[in-house]
Image: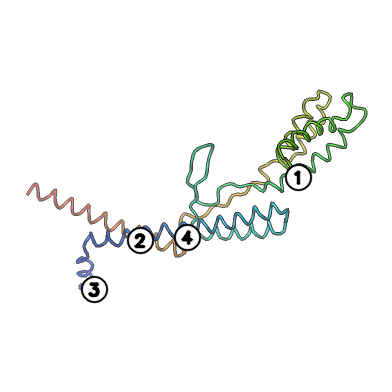
Amino acid sequence: MKKRGRIKIHRIKTWQLLIVLVPLVFLDATMLRMDHIRMTELRSAVLDADAAENDEEVARTLEELRKFVLSNMVINVIDDNGTQKITFGTGPFYLEHQYIQAANQALAEAESKITSDSNPNGNIYALASETCKALAISNGWTWDNPNYINCMVSEIQKYPAANEIQDTIKASLPSTELYRREFSSPVWAPTVTGFLILITILLIVVILCRMIVWIILRLSLLFV
């Protein structure tokens, strides 16, 4: 029976394997795309929860995203300083609204120091606010817009007497890295997609081995 099994396998032509390989590759690509779409949906849910400023929902959706990415093959294309890069996982993303909340809180704490009448430049916060509010109105910025925060910090730093306050603001503003998230997926996972890709790789190896043997046999006949 083993001998008959080997004979049947040998009877399968290489071109027949190629015919099987083509739709299998398309199926692999489809399954990988479905995993990528699911990851994108889960990541969008995290960003939506962040935009809604719902910390509990952010934590829940982050955990759901983490579990999915760690248990599936997720191939993603990210932009790395203008260069397209292929990675396994979500790629980096930021909880922007949580950062804005923390940054605004830091600015509010700095405001109490800046509004002191003893400052030779007067109410520096009020002066910066006048400039930035005008820009916010003309550009349609909201009070929690990152551009407004950057404008306030930039305007405050223009006053030499505010050096100590500038240091306070820089120290109190949170690092963006604290709000950076990235989950990496395994190169191979025991899922339907993973097993399909494994079968595809094995099939490619068999085809390549057959082609190498065929080439060796052809070359050997030239020297007989």
Residue found at the very far bottom of the displayed protein: 1
Instruction: Name the residue type under label 4.
Output: Ala
Q: Which mark is residue 24?
A: 2
* Quarter of the image that includes the N terminus: bottom left
* 129 to the left or right of 32: right
Residue that numbered label 4 is attached to: 189
Instruction: Name the residue type under label 3.
Output: Lys
Tell me which numbered mark, 1 or 4, is placed earlier along the sequence. 1
Instruction: Name the front one of labels 4 and 2.
Output: 2
Q: Are marks 4 and 2 in contact (CB under 8 Å)?
A: no
* Image: 44 above or below 142: below
Residue that numbered label 1 is attached to: 102
Label 3 element class: helix
The CA span between labels 3 and 2 is 27 Å
Q: Nearer the viewer, residue 81 or 124?
A: 124
* Image: 55 above or below 179: below
Instruction: Name the front one of labels 1 and 4.
Output: 1
Picture coordinates of residue 58 (x, y %)?
A: 68, 56
The CA span between labels 1 and 3 is 70 Å
Q: Nearer the viewer, residue 26 or 8?
A: 26
Residue that numbered label 3 is attached to: 2
Instruction: Name the residue type under label 2.
Output: Leu
Picture coordinates of residue 204 (x, y %)?
A: 31, 56
Instruction: Name the front one of labels 3 and 4.
Output: 4
The CA span between labels 4 and 2 is 18 Å
The CA span between labels 3 and 4 is 32 Å
Label 1 element class: helix
Label 2 element class: helix
Tell me which numbered mark, 3 or 2, is placed earlier along the sequence. 3
x 39%, y 61%: residue: 27
